[in-house]
Image (spheres, rainbow, N blue to C red):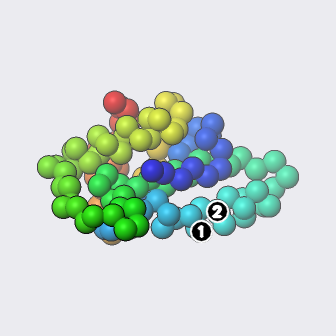
């Protein structure tokens, strides 16, 4: 699951990564208010694309469901590959992706940034 805000056709996608046990909904209020502020700041604003994703295996179970064992990814690389698959489906292939996160999402954002700006999307 993910939340998409602003212009999905923007050449810039800001990737918002939540912390441990969070979800893309952690950014809903922030992203909604930021886009509203940018829209009101200029008669013809150029809106970025904000993409808040739920990290792999962080989706809360439906109400009244049987608790399940948590699924753990084997490596950071597997997590990054899963993130890029989501970005690939939600953002233009030519977009510059700027990762921002907090807690666990911040660690992943640092890893993405250390890989460089021209990351291939699988």
Q: Quadrant of residue 11?
A: top right
- Seen as rendered, the residue at the extreme right is 43
Q: Which residue bears the numbered disc 2?
A: 32
Mark 1 neighbour density, 10 Å: few (under 14) some (14–19) many (20 or more): few
Q: Considering depth in this image, is 3 or 116 the residue closer to the camera? A: 3
Q: Quadrant of residue 12?
A: top right
Q: Are marks 1 and 2 in contact (CB under 8 Å)?
A: yes
Q: Residue at x 37, y 32 (%)?
A: 121
Separation of marks 1 and 2 at Cα, in angstroms = 5 Å
Q: Which mark is residue 121?
A: none
Q: Position of residue 58 (x, y in %)?
A: 33, 59
Q: Which residue bears the numbered disc 1?
A: 29
* 94 to the left or right of 107: right
Figure disc tally: 2
- Figure quadrant of the C terminus: top left
* 9 to the left or right of 76: right
Q: Position of residue 107 (x, y in %)?
A: 29, 61
Q: Is residue 96 above or below residue 94?
A: below
Q: Position of residue 40 (x, y in %)?
A: 80, 61
SS class, disc 1:
helix
Q: Quadrant of residue 57?
A: bottom left
Q: Is residue 101 visible?
A: no
Q: Residue at x 14, y 49 (%)?
A: 74
Q: Residue at x 65, y 44 (%)?
A: 7
SS class, disc 2:
helix
Q: Is residue 98 visible?
A: yes
Q: Position of residue 45 (x, y in %)?
A: 76, 50
Q: Residue at x 18, y 55 (%)?
A: 72
- Seen as rendered, the residue at the extreme left is 74
Mark 2 neighbour density, 10 Å: few (under 14) some (14–19) many (20 or more): some
């Amino acid at each position: 699951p993910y939340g998409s805000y602003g212009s999905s056709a923007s050449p810039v996608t800001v990737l918002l990564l939540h912390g441990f046990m969070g979800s893309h909904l952690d950014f809903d209020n922030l992203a909604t208010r930021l886009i509203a502020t940018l829209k009101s700041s200029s008669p013809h604003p150029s809106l970025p694309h904000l993409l808040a994703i739920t990290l792999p295996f962080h989706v809360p179970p439906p109400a009244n469901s049987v608790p399940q064992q948590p699924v753990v990814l084997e490596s950071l690389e597997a997590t990054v590959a899963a993130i890029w698959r989501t970005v690939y489906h939600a953002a233009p292939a030519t977009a510059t992706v700027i990762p921002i996160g907090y807690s666990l999402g911040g660690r992943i954002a640092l890893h993405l940034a250390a890989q460089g700006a021209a990351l291939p999307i699988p």
